[in-house]
Image (spheres, rainbow, N blue to C red):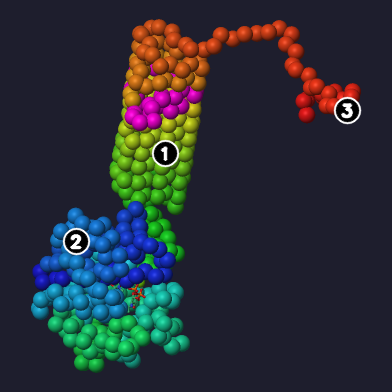
Amino acid sequence: MERLHLIILAAGKGTRMRSALPKVLQPLGGRPMLAHVLERADRLEASAVHVVVSHGREAVQAAFAQREDLRWVDQGHPGGTGHAVARALEGIPDGARVLVLYGDVPRIPLADLEGCARTRETLTVLGTRVADPRGYGRLIEDARGNLERIVEDKETDAAEAAVNRINTGVLAGDAVALRRWLGACEPPADAEREWYLTDVVAVARGEGQSVALIDSQDPDAVLGVNDRAQLAVQERLLQREIADESMREGLALADPARFDCRGTLEFGRDCRLDVNVVVEGTVILGDDVEIGAGCVLRDCRIASGARLQPYTVVEGARLGERAEAGPFARLRPGADLGEGARVGNFVEVKNARLESGAKANHLAYVGDARVGAGANLGAGTITCNYDGANKHHTEIGADAFIGSNTALVAPISIGAGATVGAGSTISRDVPDGALALTRAPARTVEGWQRPAKRPKSGEAGTEATEDGD
Ligand code: UD1
Ligand code: MG
């Protein structure tokens, strides 16, 4: 919008969070709260976006370093929301329309922002009605029902405290008027109290101006986040929104209340997610993919017909068509399961390709390796890829059979169709079709007598009991 300047307040300390992380960087849906506000701000196509920072300024600016268009305003010592807006106004031309957003109101509906930006009133405030107004500024109306002033929570008397129409913090006005009103409500330098932006309402009314009040239609979405409990409330609301939207697009969720998407989820037809699945980064599912309960998926691609059994963790990995993993499998970055390949419980795969139909069904570590089509890794197979200094590659040919509890000391190559006997430590290449084993020969001693306990001195006649106590 032409002449529209946005001010986003993001300088507060966030004391109530009790965190080392600046409040506006606290994550909601896997992204900083401020990212959600900026996403909405961008949709308004304003002439400029001014972000007021102070506490944790370096961290906040670094988190948005790629946004070269933002105009950062250093508030210095944060003296209140009025002080923050006054500082930002120093860089805004006369004649501009100003819309103030709060960095800690991350789910503010775009429609509300557009409503405020569109009004031509000298001052417009966005309010809402809530069941529990505690903690928020109350909107006090005069006898004619016009907004008269805003009283901050800690300064309310009993009658004001009972008012349930609250200030969302969003406010729009003319730059020149805002500058004048703010000048009029700046507290003296020695005042205990902060400089409140909300005081401009009473000043404007004192000048005889009318102040427009718009009520948000979505009271839950306009609530500010000051502590971790309020952040958790917004997180659940956001997750429910994502779940509902995903279900509308055809995703089957066992329980939309037990689904967490902290990134981007793409999916084809008939994908099913059981309860407590967590999605992070970019996750892409083909058609007919089934994800079991408690799986964690981060930056991965899972092709059509693939299955993840419960409690499988997949990060930076790919599963081909009809591949299967889990329960309790871990696919780390670079794990790549071909069509129909399968890894079972307590199997860890890192930077390794399992060609189509290859299997590692139980208790294995496959790292820096390629496992040929149809090969079978027995329980307890380990690729010893690390010599303490460097990582080495293991190559296993198609249809090879690796017996249980085998250590393959990399770099090493096991030929196609080769067999490795259970319990071996293989440190030399095995040719195609060969059998390799390093097992000590088994010995059987018939009628073996276990050692008997010697009688202790002075305890003549004492005998060892059969269970050896
Ligand atoms: C503020 C409003 C209150 C409203 C509520 C809605 C004031 C005085 N009060 O209270 O009426 O109901 O929001 O959520 O405005 N900030 C700065 N610089 C400062 C102080 C704050 O940039 O010096 C930023 C904070 O980072 C935050 C926002 O302004 O993003 C609001 O500050 P906060 O301290 O959370 O105010 P509230 O007590 O929530
Ligand atoms: Mg707040």
Q: Is residue 218 above or below residue 246?
A: below
Neighbours of disc 1 within 10 Å: few (<14), some (14-19), many (20+): many
Q: Hey, which residue is sitting farthest right in the picture?
A: 461
Neighbours of disc 3 within 10 Å: few (<14), some (14-19), many (20+): few
Task: Between residue 63 and residue 312, name the one nearer to us.
Answer: 63
Counting residues from the start of the chain, the first of labels 3 and 1 encountered is 1
Q: Is residue 129 magenta?
A: no
Callout 2, which amino acid?
Asp
Report the number of numbered marks.
Answer: 3
Rendered location of residue 36, percent (x, y):
28, 60
Question: For ligand 2, which image quadrant applies?
Answer: bottom left
Q: Under tag 2, what secondary structure?
A: helix
The stretch in magenta equals 364-391
Rendered location of residue 267, percent (x, y):
31, 40
Q: Under tag 1, what secondary structure?
A: strand
Rendered location of residue 231, percent (x, y):
40, 63
Q: Is residue 17 above or below residue 251?
A: below
Residue placed at 34% from the left, 65% from the top?
Answer: 23
Q: Nearer the viewer, mark 3 or mark 1?
A: 3
Describe residue 328's horizontal placement relative to residue 198 as left or right.
right
Using the numbered discs, state the Cα–Cα distance from disc 3 to disc 2 in whole angstroms: 91 Å
Q: Which mark is residue 313?
A: 1
Counting residues from the start of the chain, the first of labels 3 and 2 encountered is 2
Q: Which mark is residue 42?
A: 2
Callout 3, which amino acid?
Glu
Q: Nearer the viewer, mark 3 or mark 2?
A: 3
Rendered location of residue 54, percent (x, y):
27, 70
